[in-house]
Image (spheres, grey):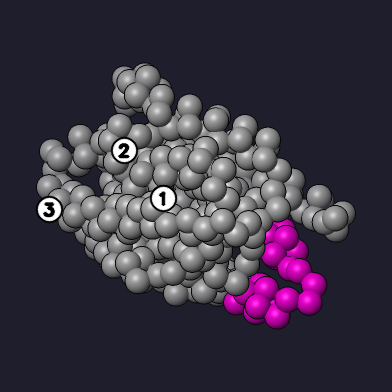
Amino acid sequence: MKPLYKLLFFPLLITSTLISISSSNWMSAWMGLEINLLCFIPLMSQKNLSNNSEATMKYFLIQSMASSLLIFSILLNLLMLNINSTLYTNNYLLMIMNTSLMLKIGIAPFHFWFVEIIEKINWMNSTILLTWQKLAPMMLLSYTTKSMIFIMIICLITTFTGSIMGLNQTSLRKIMAFSSLNHLGWMLSTLLINKLLWMIYFFIYLVITITITMLFHFLKIFFLKQMFTMPLNSFMIKFNLSLNFLSLGGLPPFLGFFPKWLVILKLSSSFNTLLLFMIFMSLITLYFYLRIIYSYLTISSNKLNYNFINYYLSDISLFNTFLTTNSLIIFINLFYLI
């Protein structure tokens, strides 16, 4: 049974994010980020786990550093505006502000803390860190993206790091972390063209990631070798994981392909070099997803290592299989909104 205090901090975690994204000034947004930090730390903490305590402390230090840099850039920018500074100086301060927000999210080259923390926490906390904790900083980042060159360089570094570093990993949490980096690069590129497209991309990434991480949580799977010993009668679970991994890799006609397709349509008119590089990096991520799928579909064992609720996992699998394979109708409608 989970401690009751966690039931209090989870609604506050959601509320603090909503405070940040709905704020009319930077001080309120910064306050929402601080409340979000203080609410997530108790959710991360678990008794008698040294790795978890280490991850909690690292997360607190990194987020505190990023918050200090953010409030410094906010105050300095307000000071410069009051004395009628030049546009160059203001853009320079906005770049510092962008850097602090990227540090909060864990975008490359500020991603080292992110991968280490993901490896030391459980799947529930990893799900929150991979999805919900990115919402407020990304929304604030969309307000300050004026330097296209800076954003393009970060996109290149992030997609490259997420693709190459994920190739030699055996930990599923690290694979999901580097996959998140690759998708963050695509999300950053949408800030250059269309903010509505970013919202669509983030929502679909959230749905697919929650599906995969929740299945790993209930199956108690943390490493690749554990997937080889899944029960032989769990065909629906294996099938669902396969579809969601292919969707996360952006293979058509699955759900994860369509936001990338929309990004390709929008970027092809003005950012061809960036687009080609991101497509090539996505092919690399798709390669290690296919390697995972091939391994656990062709290698199995009679040994049952997991205690899970069969009917619950079956319901999740059926729902997400329907959602993943019927994505074409959803995105034909979304395409006309952009």
66 magenta-colored: no
Task: For mark 2, give the secondary structure.
Answer: helix
- On screen, residue 169 versus residue 46, left or right, reads left
The amino acid pointed to by label 3 is Thr
Q: Categorize mark 2 by other alpha carbons within 10 Å: few (<14), some (14-19), many (20+).
A: many
Asked whether residue 272 is in view, the answer is yes
Q: Earlier in the sequence, mark 2 or mark 1?
A: 2
Position in image of residue 329 (x %, y %): 37, 19
Position in image of residue 310 (x %, y %): 67, 40
The span picked out in magenta is 38-58
In which quadrant of the rendered image does the N terminus lie? bottom right
Q: Earlier in the sequence, mark 3 or mark 2?
A: 2
Label 3 belongs to which residue?
Answer: 273
Q: Nearer the viewer, residue 99 or 93?
A: 99
What secondary structure is the magenta-colored segment mainly?
helix
Query: Where residue 14 is drawn, which disc sits there?
Result: none
- On screen, residue 174 versus residue 127, left or right, reads left
- On screen, residue 1 versus residue 186, left or right, reads right
Query: Which residue is at a point 64% across and 60% down the rendered structure image?
Result: 305
Task: Give the Cα distance between marks 3 and 1.
Answer: 37 Å
